[in-house]
Amino acid sequence: MGLFSLFTKEIAIDLGTANTVILHDDKVLNEPSIIAIDKNTRQVIAVGKRAQMMHGHVHPNILTIRPLKDGVIADFHNTELMLKEFIKMTIKMTTPRGYLFPPALKMVICIPSGITEVEERAVRDSAEQAGAKEVRMIHEPMAAAIGIGLDVLNPNGNMVIDIGGGTSEVAVLALGGIVTSRSSQIAGDEFNENIIDYMRRKHNLSIGETTAELIKFNVGSAIEELDNPPEDYEVYGRDLVEGLPKSVKVNYREIAKALNHSISEIEGAILSALESTPPESSADIYKNGIYIAGGGALLRGLDKRISALTHLQVHIADNPLMAVARGTSIALKNFDKFDFLIK
C-alpha cells in the first residue's frame, strides 16, 4: 500500500468559473480559469495569471479564453488543456525534479449542486483527459461547509451560501446530505457585467472585465451605508463619446446601486431555500445562523444586507475564497469518513 501511494497523487480541485484552486500535499495553486492559445497553431501560450495578463491586451493571433461559464464547462477542449497545465504546475510545486514515471492521479472535484448529468460527464471527461486515473466529485455547498469547519454529518441543519464566479449556491445541509438547495447563475461574473454596464451608462466609459474586477475589489459594496467605507477609486477606460482614454473616480455607493438588482436575485434564492426548509432544520438555522463562502463573501456589507433580510446571524467564512477547495481537500484526505458524500 505504501509503495502504491508513492505512485498515486491525490489532488483536490475547485474548478471555478473565475479561478481554479488545486490542493496537493498541502501546497496550493490558485490561478484564474483562463487560457491563451495561438490562433494559428492552437498551441497553448499561457494559462492562469500569465493568460489573465494577456486578456484584452493581445494581438489578433492570440486568443484568451475562459472555458468555464456559469459554473460549468462551456469549452471542453480548452478546459482539458488548461487543467493539464495547472496539474503540471501543481506537481512541479511539490516535486521540482519531476517523476521518473508519471504518477497516477486521484482527483476529487467540486461541482455545482444544480449541475446536469451531461455537465457532470464533461467535468469527469476533462479530468480524465487531463491525466486522472480516478475522478470523484463533491457538491460545492457540501465542500464549502466542510471547509468552513461545520460538522456536516451532524443532524443539526446548517445553511451555507457559496457565491463564486459563475454560480451562487444556497443549501441547507444535515446528516451528510443536502436537505434543500437553490442554484443561481447570478454571481461574480454577473457583478462584473453590472459594473461594466454602469460605467457605460453613467460615465460614458468603456472598461473591460479586468478593470471591472478591480473596481469590485476596491469599492465593491452590497449596501450604500458602510461603517468603514473605502476611498474613491480611479477608473481608466475609453470615452465612448470622444473615443479617447480618460479616467473617472467612482465610490462604493455607486457600485452598490449597480449591483443591487443582482444581489436581490441572490436574496430571492436564499428566501426560497428558507421557505422550503423543514421546521426542525429551520430551528437549527435560527440558532446557528447562515454561513457565506466564495469570493462574493468579500463584498462589503453583504453579511449585513442578508442579516437584515432574514433576521438571522450571518457569518463570513475565514478565507472564503479557499473554503470550497479546503473542504474538497479535507474530504479527499478523510475519504473513509466522507466517502458517501463523494460521487
Image: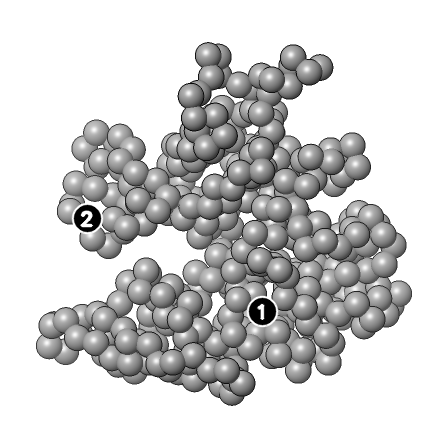
> Which mark is nearer the camera, 2 or 1?
2
Quick one: SS at disc 1? helix
Q: On the image, numbered disc 1 is attached to which residue?
A: 266
Q: On the image, numbered disc 2 is attached to which residue?
A: 58
**Residue 199, position in %: x, y?**
30, 76
**Residue 159, position in %: x, y?**
73, 62
**Tag 2 near tag 1, CB within 8 Å:** no
Name the amino acid type tagged 1: Ile
At 18% from the left edge and 70% from the top edge, which residue is drawn?
238
At 61% from the left edge and 74% from the top edge, which residue is drawn?
303
Quick one: SS at disc 2? loop
152 to 102, vertically: above or below: below
Give the quadrant of the N terminus. Answer: top right
Is residue 87 visible in this depiction of the protein?
Answer: no
Is residue 30 visible in this depiction of the protein?
Answer: yes
Give the quadrant of the C terminus. Answer: top right
Q: Earlier in the sequence, mark 2 or mark 1?
A: 2
Name the amino acid type tagged 2: Val
